[in-house]
Amino acid sequence: MLIVFSATSAFSPKLYNKLGARLSIFIGTLMCSLWVILVVLFGFGSDFYGLIPGYILAGVGLGFAVPSITRLGVSAVSESRGSLAGSILYMFQLLGGAFGLAVATTIFTDFAKNDITTIISESAVDISQTQKS
C-alpha cells in the first residue's frame, strides 16, 4: 500500500491541477471507501493475497486524497499561516489514525474474544465460568 501511495502521490498534483480540489479529493476518498468494501467482502475469508487488491486501491486513493487535502488546507489560508495550517492538518491526521487504531483494536479484540469463547464452549475442556470469562 505504501509503495503505491508513494508512487501515486508523485503525480497526484497533476490531477489536482487538472480536475481541481473537490474532484481530486472525492476520487481519493471514493477509492478508500472501495478499499474497505473489498476488505470486508474478500479479506476475511481469504488468505493474505486476497487483501492485496484492496490495499493497492487504498494506496491509490490515499495518494490522491492526502496530498490534495494538504494542499487545499495550506493554500486556503494566508501565506504567513501556511505552516500553522499544515501543522493542524498533520495533528488531525495523527488524531484520526490513533482513533482508527483504537476502533480497529476494539473490534479485533471483540471478534477474538468471541472466537475463543466459542472454541472453549465447543471443546471437551471442563473449566469454570470464571476461567471462561
Image (cartoon, rainbow, N blue to C red):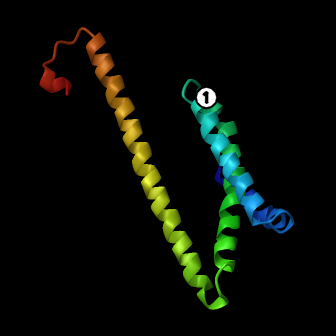
Q: Residue furthest right?
A: 18
Q: Residue furthest top?
A: 124
Q: In the rendered view, does 87 fall on the left or right side of 124?
A: right
Q: Residues within 10 Å of mark 1 (few under 14, many from 20)?
A: few
* Residue 116 picture quarter: top left
Residue plotted at (68% across, 59% down): 65
Residue 96 coordinates in the image, percent (x, y):
49, 59
Q: Residue furthest bottom?
A: 80
Say above or below: 1 vs 114.
below
Residue plotted at (74% across, 52% down): 27
* Residue 8 picture quarter: bottom right
Residue 109 coordinates in the image, percent (x, y):
36, 37
What is the number of callouts on the image? 1
Residue 85 coordinates in the image, percent (x, y):
57, 79
Say above or below: 112 vs 7.
above
Residue where numbered disc 1 is placed: 41
Whether residue 4 appears in this view of the structure is no
Residue nearest the viewer, comparing 129 with 16: 16
Residue nearest the viewer, comparing 115 with 16: 16
Residue 9 coordinates in the image, percent (x, y):
73, 62
The amino acid marked with disc number 1 is Leu
Residue plotted at (71% across, 55% down): 26
Image quadrant where one finds the C terminus: top left
Q: Secondary structure at mark 1?
A: helix
Q: In the rendered view, does 121 fall on the left or right side of 52?
A: left
Residue plotted at (64% across, 34% down): 38
Q: In the rendered view, does 40 fall on the left or right side of 130?
A: right
Whether residue 12 appears in this view of the structure is yes
